[in-house]
Amino acid sequence: MFALATTKLNEAEGLDDQARSTWLGKGLLRLAKGDDENAIYQFNAVLKEYKDDVPALLGMANIEYNNKNYKSALRRYKQALRVLPSNMPAVRFRQGRQATVEIPAHFS
């Protein structure tokens, strides 16, 4: 499944290497694969251009939380809440990389 997602994201990048959705998709894929270093790179690329991108903020917060950087993770969660205070995705934590983000249908 990761191989197909990687192939499709690489194809998308070939069409438009500046597309936020491609950067974000690669960040989320790398986060799911446990490749924090490259996920951080992708999320930072998104946040450099779109400082209030909620999925990128949540991805970075997830990595920071998992690395026990709680203060930084909390800062990013608060930033995401300021952007979308009434429409915030439900975020639940379990141990390790099992954090779950549920995005309401109107964001899909």
Image (cartoon, rainbow, N blue to C red):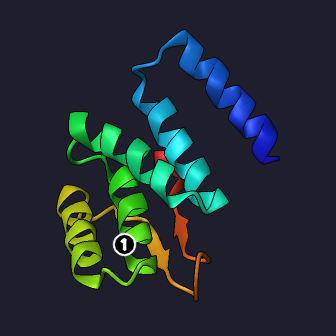
The residue at the point 17 percent across, 63 percent down is 82
Mark 1: which secondary structure?
helix
Residue 63 on image: x %, y %: 43, 68
Residue 2 on image: x %, y %: 76, 46
> On the picture, is 49 further left or further right than 87?
left
Let me know if residue 108 appears in the view: no
> On the picture, is 26 further left or further right than 20?
right
Let me know if residue 42 appears in the view: yes
The crowding category of the residue bearing disc 1, from other C-alpha atoms within 10 Å (few below 14, some 14 to 19, many at least 20), is some
Q: Residue furthest bottom?
A: 95
- For the image, the number of numbered tags is 1
Q: Would you identify the image quadrant in which residue 10 lies?
A: top right
Residue 84 on image: x %, y %: 26, 58
Q: Residue furthest top?
A: 15
The residue at the point 58 percent across, 51 percent down is 30
Q: Residue furthest front?
A: 37
Q: Is residue 19 above or below residue 46?
A: above
The residue at the point 37 percent across, 51 percent down is 56
Q: Is residue 50 above or below residue 30?
A: above
Which residue type does callout 1 highlight? Glu
Residue 76 on image: x %, y %: 25, 66
Q: Is residue 20 above or below residue 56?
A: above
The residue at the point 40 percent across, 53 percent down is 40
Give the residue pinned by disc 1: 64
Between 84 and 27, the one nearer to me in the picture: 27
